[in-house]
Image (cartoon, grey):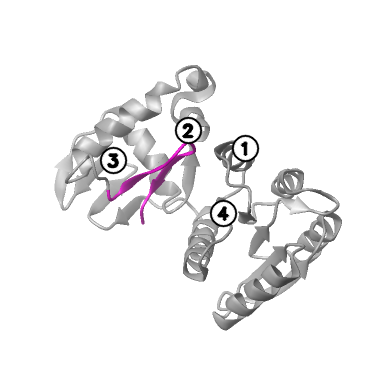
């Protein structure tokens, strides 16, 4: 396992999908190990300390969500769910458990590889000290000064608008659930005010998007949350 060749642990019982993932990932420079059951995945994750986990939810000896919960309690290794379960409730539950991303079958290799790159980049950022500034395209945030510019022009944000954008910026490229945003910005009482996120997101789009009705930066993940496009 090296920075140039990250190790991906695939926990998946479908042999055809395992072969596809193995071939795709190796052809793009990743090292790959495979597990086919809940128990085997748990043991291999602990022994190998992979850089990324690809996890199916429908394992033969247990539910993948319970495995995701156990793995997240043990480490901060990025977990990307790869599942045929496309219901919003499943996505929300998995993301609220600490899963980093959720890809619904069928999917393209380009999409999956992009999600893996984002997860690895975010993992590296979390491992080090938080950056004092973030630049994403024309958006620049200075966390210490609490200043935001868009295309080099100052943008005035309220405290809650800045805090909401900061959470999305620190997870750029990843979906952040409504529940996580409410918790991180408004604290333990945030969940009682579910409309807050939608109201403030509308305000942010008016200030940051050329056309707020067709956002290109602050994207909605329907029924789940929001994603800041990196």
Q: Name the residue under label 2.
A: 178
CA distance for labels 4 and 2: 19 Å
Q: What secondary structure is marked by label 3? A: loop
Looking at the image, which residue is at 29% across and 47% down? 141
The numbered mark, 4 or 3, whose residue comes first in the sequence reads 4
Which stretch is magenta?
Answer: 216-230
Q: Nearer the viewer, mark 1 or mark 4?
A: 4
Left or right: 110 in relation to 147 = right
Disc 2 packing (10 Å; few <14; some 14–19; many ≥20): many
Q: What secondary structure is marked by label 4? A: strand
Residue 79 picture quarter:
bottom right
Residue 145 point in image, percent of width and height? 28, 40
Q: Is residue 53 above or below residue 23?
A: above
Left or right: 148 in relation to 88 = left
CA distance for labels 1 and 4: 14 Å
Q: Residue 145 carries which label?
A: 3
Disc 4 packing (10 Å; few <14; some 14–19; many ≥20): some
Residue 96 in view: yes
Q: Name the residue under label 1.
A: 93
CA distance for labels 3 and 1: 35 Å
């Amino acid at each position: 396992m090296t920075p140039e060749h990250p190790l991906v642990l695939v926990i998946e019982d479908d042999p055809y999908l395992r072969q596809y993932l193995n071939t795709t990932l190796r052809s793009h420079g990743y090292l790959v190990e495979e597990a086919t059951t809940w128990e085997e995945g748990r043991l291999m994750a602990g022994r190998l300390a992979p850089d990324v986990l690809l996890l199916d939810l429908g394992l033969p000896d247990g539910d993948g969500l319970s495995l995701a919960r156990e793995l997240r309690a043990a480490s901060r290794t990025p977990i990307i769910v790869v599942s045929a379960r496309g219901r919003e409730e499943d996505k929300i539950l998995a993301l609220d458990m600490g899963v980093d991303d959720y890809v619904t079958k069928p999917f393209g290799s380009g999409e999956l590889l992009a999600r893996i790159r984002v997860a690895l980049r975010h993992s590296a950022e979390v491992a080090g000290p938080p950056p004092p500034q973030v630049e994403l395209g024309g958006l620049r945030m200075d966390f210490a000064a609490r200043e935001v510019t868009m295309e080099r022009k100052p943008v005035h944000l309220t405290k809650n608008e800045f805090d909401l954008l900061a959470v999305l910026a620190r997870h750029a490229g990843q979906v952040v659930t409504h529940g996580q945003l409410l918790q991180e910005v408004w604290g333990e009482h945030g969940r009682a005010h579910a409309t807050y996120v939608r109201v403030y997101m509308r305000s942010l789009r008016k200030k940051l998007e050329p056309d707020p009705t067709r956002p290109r930066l602050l994207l909605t993940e329907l029924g789940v949350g929001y994603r800041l496009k990196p």
